[in-house]
Amino acid sequence: MNPVSLAPSDLALASSLVVLDAAISIAFGLRLHRPLLVASARMVVQLLLVGLVLRVVFRSGSAALTLAIAVLMIVAAAREVAVRPKQRLAGAGNYRIAGVVVAAASLATVLLALMTAIRPTPWHDPRYAIPLMGIVLGSVLNSASLALDSFLGDVVASRNKVEARLALGAPLREALAPSMREAVRKGLIPVINQMSAAGIITLPGIMTGQLLAGMDPLRAVEYQILLLFLLAGSSGLAAGGVVWLASRSVGDRRERLRLDRLAGR
Amino acid sequence: METSPFEPAGDAAQTPRLAVRQLQSAHAGPVTLALGRGECVAIVGESGSGKSVLLRMIADLIPNDGSVLLDGAARETWPAPAWRAMVVYQAAEPAWWEASAAQHLAPAGLAAAEALARELKLRPGALQADLALMSTGERQRLALIRSLAGRPRVLLLDEPASALDAASSAALEAVLRAEMEQGLAILIVTHSEQQAARLGRRRLRMAHGRLEPA
Protein backbone atom coordinates (compact mmCIF):
# COMPACT_ATOMS: atom_id res chain seq x y z
CA MET A 1 0.00 0.00 0.00
CA ASN A 2 1.62 3.25 -1.15
CA PRO A 3 -0.15 6.37 0.06
CA VAL A 4 -0.06 9.22 -2.44
CA SER A 5 2.15 11.94 -0.97
CA LEU A 6 0.98 15.50 -1.25
CA ALA A 7 3.46 18.30 -1.89
CA PRO A 8 2.90 21.75 -0.32
CA SER A 9 2.22 23.06 -3.82
CA ASP A 10 -0.70 20.59 -4.17
CA LEU A 11 -2.33 22.02 -1.02
CA ALA A 12 -1.65 25.57 -2.15
CA LEU A 13 -3.44 24.84 -5.43
CA ALA A 14 -6.44 23.38 -3.57
CA SER A 15 -6.53 26.39 -1.27
CA SER A 16 -7.14 28.59 -4.31
CA LEU A 17 -10.70 27.19 -4.22
CA VAL A 18 -11.22 28.96 -0.88
CA VAL A 19 -9.91 32.15 -2.50
CA LEU A 20 -12.48 31.58 -5.25
CA ASP A 21 -15.22 31.32 -2.59
CA ALA A 22 -14.00 34.56 -1.05
CA ALA A 23 -14.07 36.26 -4.44
CA ILE A 24 -17.69 35.15 -4.94
CA SER A 25 -18.55 36.46 -1.50
CA ILE A 26 -17.04 39.87 -2.30
CA ALA A 27 -18.63 40.00 -5.74
CA PHE A 28 -22.13 39.31 -4.39
CA GLY A 29 -21.74 41.23 -1.11
CA LEU A 30 -22.30 38.06 0.99
CA ARG A 31 -19.91 39.23 3.74
CA LEU A 32 -18.79 35.63 4.09
CA HIS A 33 -15.19 36.08 2.98
CA ARG A 34 -13.83 36.94 6.42
CA PRO A 35 -15.46 34.03 8.31
CA LEU A 36 -14.53 31.76 5.41
CA LEU A 37 -10.86 32.70 5.50
CA VAL A 38 -10.74 32.57 9.31
CA ALA A 39 -12.35 29.11 9.30
CA SER A 40 -9.92 27.87 6.65
CA ALA A 41 -6.89 29.16 8.52
CA ARG A 42 -8.25 27.69 11.77
CA MET A 43 -8.81 24.32 10.12
CA VAL A 44 -5.24 24.22 8.77
CA VAL A 45 -3.66 25.17 12.10
CA GLN A 46 -5.87 22.77 14.12
CA LEU A 47 -5.18 19.83 11.84
CA LEU A 48 -1.42 20.51 11.70
CA LEU A 49 -1.33 20.61 15.49
CA VAL A 50 -3.30 17.36 15.73
CA GLY A 51 -0.97 15.79 13.17
CA LEU A 52 2.08 16.79 15.19
CA VAL A 53 0.60 15.56 18.47
CA LEU A 54 -0.49 12.25 16.93
CA ARG A 55 2.94 11.75 15.36
CA VAL A 56 4.53 12.12 18.80
CA VAL A 57 1.95 9.86 20.47
CA PHE A 58 2.14 7.19 17.75
CA ARG A 59 5.91 7.10 17.95
CA SER A 60 5.92 6.85 21.74
CA GLY A 61 3.16 4.21 21.79
CA SER A 62 2.61 5.20 25.43
CA ALA A 63 -0.55 3.79 27.02
CA ALA A 64 -0.77 6.70 29.47
CA LEU A 65 -0.53 9.28 26.69
CA THR A 66 -3.15 7.43 24.63
CA LEU A 67 -5.49 7.34 27.60
CA ALA A 68 -4.93 11.04 28.31
CA ILE A 69 -5.88 11.94 24.75
CA ALA A 70 -8.94 9.68 24.84
CA VAL A 71 -10.09 11.33 28.08
CA LEU A 72 -9.57 14.79 26.58
CA MET A 73 -11.69 13.82 23.57
CA ILE A 74 -14.44 12.39 25.80
CA VAL A 75 -14.54 15.55 27.92
CA ALA A 76 -14.80 17.76 24.84
CA ALA A 77 -17.62 15.63 23.37
CA ALA A 78 -19.48 15.48 26.70
CA ARG A 79 -19.35 19.26 26.99
CA GLU A 80 -20.93 19.64 23.55
CA VAL A 81 -23.70 17.18 24.46
CA ALA A 82 -24.40 19.04 27.71
CA VAL A 83 -24.65 22.54 26.25
CA ARG A 84 -26.66 21.64 23.12
CA PRO A 85 -30.18 21.22 24.66
CA LYS A 86 -32.27 24.35 25.16
CA GLN A 87 -33.38 23.01 28.55
CA ARG A 88 -30.82 22.56 31.32
CA LEU A 89 -31.14 20.37 34.38
CA ALA A 90 -30.24 22.20 37.59
CA GLY A 91 -27.07 21.31 39.47
CA ALA A 92 -25.04 20.75 36.27
CA GLY A 93 -27.33 17.78 35.54
CA ASN A 94 -26.72 17.95 31.80
CA TYR A 95 -22.96 17.70 32.38
CA ARG A 96 -23.26 14.74 34.72
CA ILE A 97 -25.50 12.83 32.36
CA ALA A 98 -23.43 13.68 29.27
CA GLY A 99 -20.15 12.78 30.99
CA VAL A 100 -21.32 9.37 32.18
CA VAL A 101 -23.06 8.39 28.95
CA VAL A 102 -20.44 9.67 26.47
CA ALA A 103 -17.64 7.94 28.37
CA ALA A 104 -19.52 4.65 28.80
CA ALA A 105 -20.88 4.43 25.23
CA SER A 106 -17.60 5.34 23.49
CA LEU A 107 -15.29 3.29 25.71
CA ALA A 108 -17.52 0.21 25.54
CA THR A 109 -17.65 0.13 21.74
CA VAL A 110 -14.02 1.11 21.14
CA LEU A 111 -12.75 -1.48 23.62
CA LEU A 112 -14.97 -4.11 22.02
CA ALA A 113 -13.49 -3.33 18.59
CA LEU A 114 -9.91 -3.30 19.86
CA MET A 115 -10.28 -6.56 21.78
CA THR A 116 -12.14 -8.53 19.11
CA ALA A 117 -12.13 -7.30 15.51
CA ILE A 118 -9.01 -5.18 15.12
CA ARG A 119 -6.72 -6.69 17.78
CA PRO A 120 -3.58 -4.56 17.37
CA THR A 121 -0.50 -5.34 19.48
CA PRO A 122 -0.43 -3.91 22.02
CA TRP A 123 -4.22 -3.60 22.14
CA HIS A 124 -3.97 0.06 23.14
CA ASP A 125 -1.75 1.00 20.14
CA PRO A 126 -2.63 4.70 19.66
CA ARG A 127 -2.60 4.32 15.86
CA TYR A 128 -5.83 2.33 16.19
CA ALA A 129 -7.30 3.46 19.51
CA ILE A 130 -7.30 7.22 18.86
CA PRO A 131 -8.85 7.33 15.36
CA LEU A 132 -11.47 4.79 16.47
CA MET A 133 -12.28 6.90 19.52
CA GLY A 134 -12.61 9.96 17.31
CA ILE A 135 -15.07 8.47 14.87
CA VAL A 136 -17.14 6.79 17.59
CA LEU A 137 -17.27 10.02 19.63
CA GLY A 138 -18.56 11.93 16.61
CA SER A 139 -21.49 9.56 16.38
CA VAL A 140 -22.08 9.50 20.14
CA LEU A 141 -22.04 13.30 20.20
CA ASN A 142 -24.75 13.49 17.53
CA SER A 143 -27.04 10.88 19.05
CA ALA A 144 -26.69 11.95 22.67
CA SER A 145 -27.20 15.66 22.04
CA LEU A 146 -30.21 15.13 19.77
CA ALA A 147 -31.80 12.68 22.20
CA LEU A 148 -31.22 14.84 25.28
CA ASP A 149 -32.49 17.98 23.57
CA SER A 150 -35.56 16.15 22.26
CA PHE A 151 -36.41 14.54 25.61
CA LEU A 152 -36.13 17.65 27.77
CA GLY A 153 -37.89 19.83 25.18
CA ASP A 154 -40.70 17.32 24.72
CA VAL A 155 -41.29 16.85 28.45
CA VAL A 156 -41.59 20.61 28.93
CA ALA A 157 -43.91 20.96 25.93
CA SER A 158 -46.14 18.06 27.00
CA ARG A 159 -46.07 18.61 30.76
CA ASN A 160 -49.88 18.84 30.91
CA LYS A 161 -50.25 15.47 29.23
CA VAL A 162 -47.65 13.88 31.50
CA GLU A 163 -49.36 15.32 34.59
CA ALA A 164 -52.79 14.22 33.35
CA ARG A 165 -51.50 10.64 33.10
CA LEU A 166 -49.92 10.85 36.55
CA ALA A 167 -53.14 12.29 38.01
CA LEU A 168 -55.05 9.24 36.76
CA GLY A 169 -52.61 6.88 38.48
CA ALA A 170 -50.05 6.13 35.76
CA PRO A 171 -46.49 5.42 36.95
CA LEU A 172 -44.01 8.15 35.97
CA ARG A 173 -42.22 5.74 33.63
CA GLU A 174 -45.44 5.19 31.68
CA ALA A 175 -46.28 8.90 31.61
CA LEU A 176 -42.83 9.74 30.24
CA ALA A 177 -42.67 6.82 27.79
CA PRO A 178 -43.87 8.74 24.69
CA SER A 179 -41.24 11.46 25.21
CA MET A 180 -38.55 8.85 25.87
CA ARG A 181 -39.37 6.83 22.76
CA GLU A 182 -39.44 9.93 20.58
CA ALA A 183 -36.08 11.12 21.93
CA VAL A 184 -34.31 7.79 21.32
CA ARG A 185 -35.82 7.67 17.83
CA LYS A 186 -34.49 11.17 17.04
CA GLY A 187 -31.09 10.24 18.43
CA LEU A 188 -30.81 7.24 16.11
CA ILE A 189 -31.89 8.96 12.89
CA PRO A 190 -28.37 10.22 11.95
CA VAL A 191 -26.74 6.79 12.16
CA ILE A 192 -29.64 5.14 10.34
CA ASN A 193 -29.28 7.74 7.57
CA GLN A 194 -25.55 7.16 7.52
CA MET A 195 -25.96 3.41 7.11
CA SER A 196 -28.67 3.58 4.45
CA ALA A 197 -26.76 6.19 2.43
CA ALA A 198 -23.42 4.41 2.72
CA GLY A 199 -21.94 3.54 -0.66
CA ILE A 200 -24.88 4.76 -2.75
CA ILE A 201 -25.36 8.40 -1.85
CA THR A 202 -22.02 8.96 -0.11
CA LEU A 203 -18.72 7.17 0.17
CA PRO A 204 -18.02 7.22 3.90
CA GLY A 205 -15.02 9.32 4.95
CA ILE A 206 -12.91 6.50 6.34
CA MET A 207 -13.41 4.38 3.25
CA THR A 208 -12.64 7.31 0.95
CA GLY A 209 -9.44 7.93 2.89
CA GLN A 210 -8.38 4.31 2.62
CA LEU A 211 -9.18 4.16 -1.09
CA LEU A 212 -7.17 7.34 -1.72
CA ALA A 213 -4.36 5.83 0.32
CA GLY A 214 -4.33 2.87 -2.06
CA MET A 215 -6.18 0.15 -0.13
CA ASP A 216 -8.05 -2.63 -1.95
CA PRO A 217 -11.75 -1.55 -2.20
CA LEU A 218 -13.11 -4.75 -0.66
CA ARG A 219 -10.80 -4.47 2.35
CA ALA A 220 -11.75 -0.81 2.73
CA VAL A 221 -15.42 -1.84 2.63
CA GLU A 222 -14.88 -4.43 5.36
CA TYR A 223 -13.41 -1.75 7.59
CA GLN A 224 -16.28 0.59 6.84
CA ILE A 225 -18.88 -2.07 7.69
CA LEU A 226 -17.17 -2.74 11.00
CA LEU A 227 -17.09 0.98 11.76
CA LEU A 228 -20.76 1.56 10.92
CA PHE A 229 -21.75 -1.29 13.23
CA LEU A 230 -19.66 0.32 15.96
CA LEU A 231 -21.31 3.68 15.31
CA ALA A 232 -24.79 2.15 15.38
CA GLY A 233 -24.03 0.45 18.68
CA SER A 234 -22.50 3.48 20.34
CA SER A 235 -25.32 5.74 19.10
CA GLY A 236 -27.93 3.43 20.56
CA LEU A 237 -26.13 3.25 23.90
CA ALA A 238 -25.70 7.04 23.95
CA ALA A 239 -29.29 7.94 23.02
CA GLY A 240 -30.78 5.34 25.36
CA GLY A 241 -28.40 6.30 28.15
CA VAL A 242 -29.03 10.05 28.15
CA VAL A 243 -32.78 9.60 27.91
CA TRP A 244 -32.88 7.06 30.73
CA LEU A 245 -30.76 9.20 33.07
CA ALA A 246 -32.64 12.40 32.15
CA SER A 247 -35.99 10.68 32.80
CA ARG A 248 -34.78 9.86 36.30
CA SER A 249 -33.67 13.47 36.82
CA VAL A 250 -37.09 14.94 36.03
CA GLY A 251 -38.87 12.66 38.50
CA ASP A 252 -38.70 12.08 42.25
CA ARG A 253 -39.36 9.33 44.77
CA ARG A 254 -43.12 9.96 44.73
CA GLU A 255 -43.10 9.75 40.90
CA ARG A 256 -43.90 13.42 40.39
CA LEU A 257 -42.87 15.39 37.32
CA ARG A 258 -40.29 17.82 38.70
CA LEU A 259 -39.80 20.45 36.03
CA ASP A 260 -38.64 22.77 38.80
CA ARG A 261 -35.39 20.82 38.45
CA LEU A 262 -34.76 22.50 35.11
CA ALA A 263 -32.48 25.49 35.61
CA GLY A 264 -33.98 28.92 35.09
CA ARG A 265 -37.60 27.85 35.60
CA MET B 1 -71.35 20.70 70.20
CA GLU B 2 -69.99 23.42 67.93
CA THR B 3 -69.51 22.27 64.34
CA SER B 4 -66.30 23.10 62.53
CA PRO B 5 -66.47 24.12 58.87
CA PHE B 6 -63.31 22.06 58.29
CA GLU B 7 -64.71 18.74 59.59
CA PRO B 8 -67.61 16.64 58.33
CA ALA B 9 -70.81 17.00 60.32
CA GLY B 10 -72.18 13.98 62.15
CA ASP B 11 -70.52 11.14 64.00
CA ALA B 12 -67.14 12.43 65.19
CA ALA B 13 -65.92 8.88 65.85
CA GLN B 14 -66.31 7.90 62.17
CA THR B 15 -63.07 7.84 60.19
CA PRO B 16 -63.20 10.52 57.49
CA ARG B 17 -62.82 9.41 53.86
CA LEU B 18 -60.11 12.05 53.33
CA ALA B 19 -58.24 13.82 56.12
CA VAL B 20 -55.77 16.61 55.37
CA ARG B 21 -53.55 17.76 58.21
CA GLN B 22 -51.24 20.78 58.09
CA LEU B 23 -50.69 20.36 54.37
CA GLN B 24 -48.42 23.04 52.92
CA SER B 25 -45.90 24.02 50.30
CA ALA B 26 -44.10 27.24 49.43
CA HIS B 27 -47.24 28.42 47.59
CA ALA B 28 -50.14 27.47 49.87
CA GLY B 29 -51.12 26.24 53.31
CA PRO B 30 -51.01 25.12 55.98
CA VAL B 31 -54.44 23.59 55.34
CA THR B 32 -56.38 21.25 57.61
CA LEU B 33 -59.57 19.72 56.29
CA ALA B 34 -61.61 16.53 56.36
CA LEU B 35 -64.25 15.02 54.07
CA GLY B 36 -66.70 12.30 55.05
CA ARG B 37 -67.82 9.44 52.81
CA GLY B 38 -70.16 10.75 50.10
CA GLU B 39 -69.50 14.34 51.07
CA CYS B 40 -68.75 17.26 48.79
CA VAL B 41 -66.86 20.32 49.93
CA ALA B 42 -66.76 23.35 47.64
CA ILE B 43 -63.86 25.77 47.61
CA VAL B 44 -64.25 29.24 46.21
CA GLY B 45 -61.70 32.03 46.04
CA GLU B 46 -59.91 34.38 43.71
CA SER B 47 -57.65 33.19 40.92
CA GLY B 48 -54.14 32.61 42.20
CA SER B 49 -55.25 32.15 45.81
CA GLY B 50 -53.87 28.60 45.85
CA LYS B 51 -56.98 26.48 45.16
CA SER B 52 -55.39 24.40 42.41
CA VAL B 53 -52.16 24.14 44.39
CA LEU B 54 -54.14 22.61 47.29
CA LEU B 55 -55.75 19.98 45.01
CA ARG B 56 -52.38 19.16 43.43
CA MET B 57 -50.77 18.80 46.87
CA ILE B 58 -53.49 16.40 48.02
CA ALA B 59 -52.98 14.31 44.85
CA ASP B 60 -49.22 14.36 45.61
CA LEU B 61 -48.44 15.84 42.19
CA ILE B 62 -46.24 18.57 43.65
CA PRO B 63 -43.85 18.49 46.62
CA ASN B 64 -45.64 19.15 49.91
CA ASP B 65 -45.36 18.74 53.68
CA GLY B 66 -48.02 17.54 56.08
CA SER B 67 -50.17 14.45 56.14
CA VAL B 68 -53.07 13.18 54.07
CA LEU B 69 -55.07 10.10 55.09
CA LEU B 70 -57.54 8.05 53.07
CA ASP B 71 -60.03 6.12 55.23
CA GLY B 72 -57.58 6.50 58.11
CA ALA B 73 -54.46 5.22 56.31
CA ALA B 74 -51.55 7.53 55.55
CA ARG B 75 -50.82 8.48 51.95
CA GLU B 76 -47.29 7.07 52.19
CA THR B 77 -48.78 3.61 52.76
CA TRP B 78 -49.32 3.39 48.98
CA PRO B 79 -46.95 3.90 46.07
CA ALA B 80 -47.69 7.33 44.59
CA PRO B 81 -49.41 6.01 41.42
CA ALA B 82 -51.77 3.85 43.50
CA TRP B 83 -52.60 6.88 45.66
CA ARG B 84 -53.34 9.04 42.62
CA ALA B 85 -55.57 6.33 41.14
CA MET B 86 -57.73 6.47 44.29
CA VAL B 87 -57.54 10.24 44.82
CA VAL B 88 -57.97 11.58 41.29
CA TYR B 89 -57.20 15.16 40.38
CA GLN B 90 -58.94 16.64 37.35
CA ALA B 91 -57.25 19.79 36.05
CA ALA B 92 -59.17 22.85 34.92
CA GLU B 93 -58.01 22.22 31.36
CA PRO B 94 -57.78 18.43 31.13
CA ALA B 95 -55.04 17.24 28.78
CA TRP B 96 -55.51 14.38 26.30
CA TRP B 97 -52.81 12.24 24.75
CA GLU B 98 -54.86 10.11 22.35
CA ALA B 99 -57.16 11.15 19.49
CA SER B 100 -60.47 10.17 21.12
CA ALA B 101 -61.76 9.93 24.68
CA ALA B 102 -62.46 6.21 24.29
CA GLN B 103 -58.77 5.56 23.63
CA HIS B 104 -58.03 6.89 27.13
CA LEU B 105 -60.24 4.25 28.72
CA ALA B 106 -59.80 0.54 29.37
CA PRO B 107 -61.94 -1.47 26.91
CA ALA B 108 -63.72 -3.12 29.83
CA GLY B 109 -64.97 0.23 31.08
CA LEU B 110 -66.39 1.37 27.75
CA ALA B 111 -70.00 0.31 28.41
CA ALA B 112 -70.12 2.18 31.72
CA ALA B 113 -68.54 5.20 30.01
CA GLU B 114 -71.25 5.15 27.30
CA ALA B 115 -73.97 5.13 29.97
CA LEU B 116 -72.30 8.04 31.75
CA ALA B 117 -71.99 9.95 28.45
CA ARG B 118 -75.77 9.68 27.97
CA GLU B 119 -76.39 10.95 31.51
CA LEU B 120 -74.07 13.87 30.81
CA LYS B 121 -76.11 14.75 27.70
CA LEU B 122 -73.21 14.13 25.32
CA ARG B 123 -74.14 13.43 21.72
CA PRO B 124 -73.99 9.78 20.56
CA GLY B 125 -70.51 8.80 19.43
CA ALA B 126 -68.85 11.54 21.52
CA LEU B 127 -66.49 9.03 23.10
CA GLN B 128 -65.14 7.98 19.70
CA ALA B 129 -65.06 11.49 18.16
CA ASP B 130 -61.87 13.43 17.46
CA LEU B 131 -61.15 15.43 20.62
CA ALA B 132 -59.55 18.25 18.64
CA LEU B 133 -62.89 18.95 16.96
CA MET B 134 -64.97 19.05 20.16
CA SER B 135 -66.03 22.03 22.22
CA THR B 136 -64.44 22.84 25.58
CA GLY B 137 -67.71 21.96 27.29
CA GLU B 138 -67.82 18.52 25.64
CA ARG B 139 -64.21 17.85 26.60
CA GLN B 140 -64.94 18.86 30.21
CA ARG B 141 -67.72 16.27 30.44
CA LEU B 142 -65.53 13.63 28.76
CA ALA B 143 -62.81 14.41 31.31
CA LEU B 144 -65.23 13.61 34.13
CA ILE B 145 -65.99 10.25 32.50
CA ARG B 146 -62.25 9.55 32.29
CA SER B 147 -61.72 10.60 35.92
CA LEU B 148 -64.53 8.34 37.18
CA ALA B 149 -63.46 5.35 35.04
CA GLY B 150 -60.94 4.12 37.62
CA ARG B 151 -63.58 4.17 40.43
CA PRO B 152 -61.69 6.63 42.66
CA ARG B 153 -62.58 7.12 46.33
CA VAL B 154 -61.93 10.86 46.24
CA LEU B 155 -62.31 13.25 43.31
CA LEU B 156 -60.46 16.57 43.28
CA LEU B 157 -62.25 18.69 40.68
CA ASP B 158 -60.78 21.95 39.43
CA GLU B 159 -63.49 24.06 37.71
CA PRO B 160 -65.19 21.02 36.09
CA ALA B 161 -68.13 23.04 34.73
CA SER B 162 -66.55 26.34 33.71
CA ALA B 163 -67.53 25.91 30.05
CA LEU B 164 -70.93 24.25 30.59
CA ASP B 165 -74.39 25.73 30.02
CA ALA B 166 -77.04 25.43 32.73
CA ALA B 167 -78.52 22.14 31.44
CA SER B 168 -75.12 20.40 31.08
CA SER B 169 -74.09 21.74 34.48
CA ALA B 170 -77.19 20.25 36.07
CA ALA B 171 -76.49 16.91 34.34
CA LEU B 172 -72.90 16.97 35.64
CA GLU B 173 -74.08 17.74 39.18
CA ALA B 174 -76.60 14.89 39.00
CA VAL B 175 -73.82 12.47 38.02
CA LEU B 176 -71.66 13.73 40.88
CA ARG B 177 -74.51 13.33 43.38
CA ALA B 178 -75.10 9.74 42.22
CA GLU B 179 -71.39 8.96 42.72
CA MET B 180 -71.50 10.57 46.17
CA GLU B 181 -74.28 8.20 47.16
CA GLN B 182 -71.83 5.37 46.35
CA GLY B 183 -69.36 6.91 48.83
CA LEU B 184 -67.25 9.15 46.59
CA ALA B 185 -65.94 12.22 48.41
CA ILE B 186 -65.52 15.33 46.28
CA LEU B 187 -63.45 18.44 46.78
CA ILE B 188 -64.52 20.89 44.11
CA VAL B 189 -62.98 24.22 43.19
CA THR B 190 -65.49 26.48 41.51
CA HIS B 191 -66.00 30.11 40.62
CA SER B 192 -69.77 29.67 40.75
CA GLU B 193 -71.23 30.42 44.19
CA GLN B 194 -74.51 28.82 43.06
CA GLN B 195 -72.79 25.58 42.09
CA ALA B 196 -70.89 25.63 45.37
CA ALA B 197 -74.19 26.01 47.22
CA ARG B 198 -75.94 23.27 45.20
CA LEU B 199 -73.21 20.66 45.62
CA GLY B 200 -71.52 21.30 48.93
CA ARG B 201 -73.10 21.28 52.32
CA ARG B 202 -69.90 22.95 53.45
CA ARG B 203 -68.26 25.79 51.59
CA LEU B 204 -64.80 27.17 52.20
CA ARG B 205 -62.96 30.14 50.81
CA MET B 206 -59.29 30.09 49.82
CA ALA B 207 -57.44 33.37 50.41
CA HIS B 208 -53.67 33.78 50.27
CA GLY B 209 -53.13 30.04 50.49
CA ARG B 210 -55.30 29.57 53.61
CA LEU B 211 -58.80 28.13 53.92
CA GLU B 212 -61.47 30.06 55.80
CA PRO B 213 -65.24 29.54 56.23
CA ALA B 214 -67.08 31.03 53.26
Image: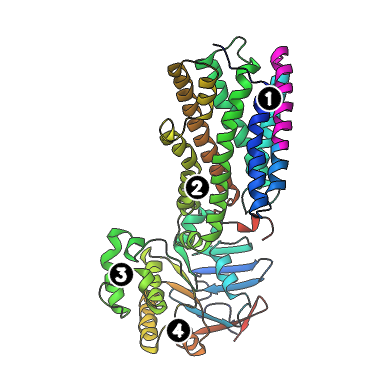
Q: Chain of mark 2?
A: A
Residue A183: image tag: 2
Taking the spot 60% from the left edge, 83% from the top edge, the residue there is B45
Q: Which residues are magenta?
A: A41-64
Q: Which residue is disc 3 drawn over?
A: B129
Q: Chain of mark 1?
A: A
Q: Which residue is disc 4 drawn over?
A: B199
Q: CA distance from mark 2 to mark 3?
A: 29 Å
| Magenta span contains residue A52 | yes
Residue A146, by quadrant, is top right
Of label 1 and label 2, which has the lower sequence position? 1
Q: Which residue is disc 1 drawn over?
A: A9
Q: Nearer the viewer, mark 1 or mark 2?
A: 1
The amino acid pointed to by label 4 is Leu
Taking the spot 71% from the left edge, 12% from the top edge, the residue there is A59
Q: CA distance from mark 1 to mark 2?
A: 48 Å
The amino acid pointed to by label 2 is Ala
Q: CA distance from mark 3 to mark 1?
A: 72 Å
Assess disc 2: are there few (<14), some (14-19) or many (≥20) residues with their C-alpha within 10 Å of its C-alpha: many
Assess disc 3: are there few (<14), some (14-19) or many (≥20) residues with their C-alpha within 10 Å of its C-alpha: some
Q: Are marks 3 and 4 on the same chain?
A: yes
Q: Nearer the viewer, residue A208 or A68?
A: A208
